[in-house]
Image: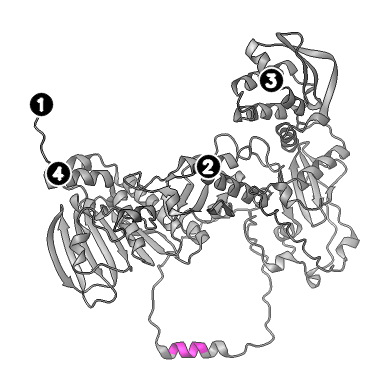
Amino acid sequence: MPTINVLDKEVSELIAAGEVIERPSSVIKELVENSVDSGAKHITVEIKNGGTTYMRVTDDGCGISFDDVPKAFLRHATSKISDKADLDNILTLGFRGEALASVAAVSSVEVMTKPKDETYGTLYNIEGSVEVSHEKGGCPDGTTIIIRDLFYNVPARRKFMKKDVTEGNAVSQILQKITMSHPDIAFKFIRDNRVEFNSSGDGELYSAIYAIYGRDFTRSLVETDYEYNGVHVSGYVVKPLYSRTNRSFQNFFVNGRYVRSRICTSALENAYTNMIMVGKFPACVMMIDLSPSAMDVNIHPAKAEVRFTDEKNVSDAIYFAVKNALSEDGMVYEFQMKPRVDWTKKPEEPQEIKQQEFIFTPVDKIAEAEKSIEQPQSAEISAPEPETADIEPFSAYNKPAESEKTENAENIEAQQHSVMETGLTVNVSADEENTEPEEKEEEIPEIKPVEGFSYINSASFKKAPEPVIISDENGEAFGVYIVAETDDKKFILIDKHAAHERIIFEELKSRNCRQYSQMLINGVKVLLAGDDFSALEENTEMLADMGFSFDFSQKPCAVATAVPTFIMELDMEEIIAEIAVNLRMNRHDPQSHSLDDLLHTVACKSAIRGNDKNSLAELQALADRVYNDDTIRHCPHGRPVMFTMTKSNIDHQFGRT
């Protein structure tokens, strides 16, 4: 048997460092989390060559005293816990005291730190866990740590590092997560001497998301705020129409810590069931706050995963939070019209973005400014004339100004009658043009959900049906879309096939099809395997709710004596056989995802199609149902069924306002 040896300190520290430090992004994560725990309000991260040769993290936190700096680089040295009881109440990002020791074991580290109440700071240098220098010096309040030549003493690890671009992207992604999890801290990321992003630190999560992902992504978000059994879920989720092609935009933060969680991902995607297309994934920036004792953050070396004490409780909280947010907002889409682009015009050169600078202002200048503010302003202020030369593109997610919400009678002039050859005829009466402004009606207060209910469905927000008026004699465009308008001056387009498909799907899924059940003179006989026959026979009541009735006296053939009216023209033998197979495969959960897929197929085949001839009454009934039913907003495959546009937005596009 080989002799057992105790490893040298140098070797053991290199092995331990490998558990925590995998790449430059691991170093940045540990150092930035320490900066956050120090109470910093401004954190700057700079890297070069993907972080392999140079990394710098600067903060304005509490700093480290002269005597404590060497101890900070010892393994299992930390200021955040003192005994085992603290492990049940961890509120900081770092706590195990391994980050600095692991970083120092595989790189050259320079530290400049100074607490606010001390006159001098500390300059400290350590390479490969060996102290090089430790002296006092001048430096600003806070801490600056510079890492050079990562893995210089571990050639094998350095050899397997990826390209600089890949490593830099990994650093950027880690810093993006931390920026969104702490919107009250201003982060700046400098990559190869170029500022990649810069957050404001104003405490608003929306601002942090905007700084990371930009305008288009943030406009597609819906806010959520929900609490369930001690679990508070807040943040933003994306509207179903703007789902992504992968899960990289799913961000979950538990007590301010970014985590990867199968429980959270599953709950989020379940809430979007039948709202997004196949192959698409929802995006979110979700904050989950719960008691520290209800989770374990010490199950992963890099603290990237957590374990919940009650997983179902957390899953339900996320599911209900997303469902409620989507039912209240995000289910109706408006047109996004853009101005024409002159492709022959040379684009303007982009202007250089200058970083904000802090400027010292003398006291006398401040006094003069305050006096000018205190002076009363003139009562008459001339309003600027509205500019109509450059029409900005309308976006459904811009918050409308007050001037757009109400129409001013003084700005309404007699409009000229015109007919545009666009395939639709728009009639404008003279009475409508000269109508005096009506008094603004009182807004109907939102009906609050009954206290004690955990899930707020569409019925909780049900409002009085609004009249929908079909625009012309045909009521259709291209034989596919219903064209209508509402009394509150909204123009709407409805995809009649997608809308009817969703209505049928909801009826089938809710088992509310007895009213559509049609008795058959000649029953449909279907030959089934023994297990399929038994599964169909065991779910007679559920099938009756779906509009089916069977005679099981001719085994192994099941005879359908009644079916829903909307599938009578389809291949009923094939549909019944598919239902039987599904019930056999999901005996314990007949309402599984596979049954949903089957109902999708039935609904799609049963719905009216484009270019089908429909009467005006049929279109009117369909439009009324779609516009006033919040559940009919997407077809079962996730496509939207309706778009809206307000009259004021149409007027704006034509330059009439």
The image shows residue 425 at horizontal and vertical percentages of 83, 48
Residue for badge 1 = 1
Q: Give the amino acid type for the residue marked by disc 1 in the picture.
A: Met
Residue for badge 3 = 538
Q: Give the amino acid type for the residue marked by disc 2 in the picture.
A: Lys
Position of 131 with respect to 218 (left or right) is: left
| CB within 8 Å, label 1 to label 2 | no
> Residue 114's image quarter?
bottom left
| CB within 8 Å, label 1 to label 4 | no
Q: CA distance from mark 1 to mark 2?
A: 49 Å
The count of marks equals 4
Q: Earlier in the sequence, mark 1 or mark 2?
A: 1
Q: Residue 226 or 402: which is nearer the viewer?
A: 226
Residue range of the region highlighted in magenta in the rendering: 365-370
Q: Secondary structure at mark 3?
A: helix
Q: CA distance from mark 1 to mark 4?
A: 22 Å
Q: Residue 389 or 579: which is nearer the viewer?
A: 579
| CB within 8 Å, label 2 to label 3 | no
Q: Give the amino acid type for the residue marked by disc 3 in the picture.
A: Glu
Q: Secondary structure at mark 2?
A: helix
Quadrant where the N terminus sits is: top left
The image shows residue 121 at horizontal and vertical percentages of 22, 72
Q: Residue 40 or 585: which is nearer the viewer?
A: 585
Residue for badge 4 = 11
Position of 239 with respect to 550 (left or right) is: left
Q: Earlier in the sequence, mark 2 or mark 3?
A: 2
Residue shown at the point (35%, 61%) measured from the top left: 37
The image shows residue 238 at horizontal and vertical percentages of 57, 49
| CB within 8 Å, label 4 to label 3 | no
